[in-house]
Image: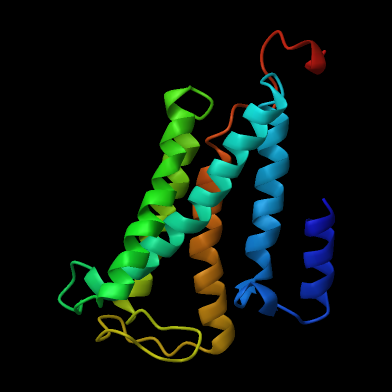
Amino acid sequence: MLLIVYEVIQIASGELYQKALNHMDGTTLIELGILTLLGIYTLRHQTDLHAVSFTLVAGLSFIFIYEAIYKWSFYLAPFPFGKPMPPAEIREFVIQSSVALTVLTGFAVQDLRLKKWTFIWLGLFVILWIFWLLTGYPQITGEVIFPRTLRIDFTYNMLYVLNRSTKFVMYLAYLTLFPPLRKPGDPSTV
């Protein structure tokens, strides 16, 4: 909870990025904080180690799936753009993909489940991502990576919202993987 409060204060004071974390966006840290609280709460019927471990797995997977998709899109997107991925980037992509896939362990022990809302949020993510690619995959720095199919001149703020929106809907999909807040017959809900 302290991380969430700290980041809200940082963002409110104009500090969107955490320099100490290689300029990670503060909203990502807020999302991780909420995901952690929700995960530990919904897995409270498990041992503490179990609940914390699978919550950390989900958080890491959330961060790295986004980064892996980002890198894949930058280099290997199956559109007519794409460019060769340098060996160092391939190594990083393999690591990101591997860490992202650790979320499967949560499904193996049935702590995490796909739900209707998971697919709805993932579908919205895909739509936003395709839109981003079709507009040339513009970066916050102003660089446009691919030829534009849709010609839209984004401002910095528009690009920031597009980038954050894609990550936010992915985040919402991850939130839906956890068990419901209330379970039928759970004495803590009476």
Residue drawn at x 68%, y 69% is 26
Which sits in the foreground, 97 or 144? 97
Q: Is residue 86 above or below residue 141?
A: above
| Residue 73 visible in image | no
Q: Is residue 100 above or below residue 107?
A: below
Q: Is residue 182 above or below residue 56?
A: above
Q: What colouring style does the render use?
A: rainbow
Residue furthest top in the image? 185
Rendered location of residue 117, percent (x, y): 49, 38
Rendered location of residue 64, percent (x, y): 46, 57
Rendered location of residue 103, percent (x, y): 46, 40
Name which quarter of the figure residue 70 lies in.
bottom left
Residue drawn at x 69%, y 19% is 45
Compared across the picture, whether 133 is left or right of 55 comes to: left
Residue furthest left in the image? 80
Across the whole image, how many numbered discs are drawn on residues? 0
Residue drawn at x 44%, y 64% is 67
| Residue 94 visible in image | yes
Residue drawn at x 79%, y 17% is 189
Rendered location of residue 109, percent (x, y): 48, 22
Figure quadrant of the C terminus: top right
Name which quarter of the figure residue 105 lies in.
top left
Q: Is residue 165 above or below residue 97?
A: below
Name which quarter of the figure residue 183 lies in.
top right
Compared across the picture, whether 107 is left or right of 4 comes to: left
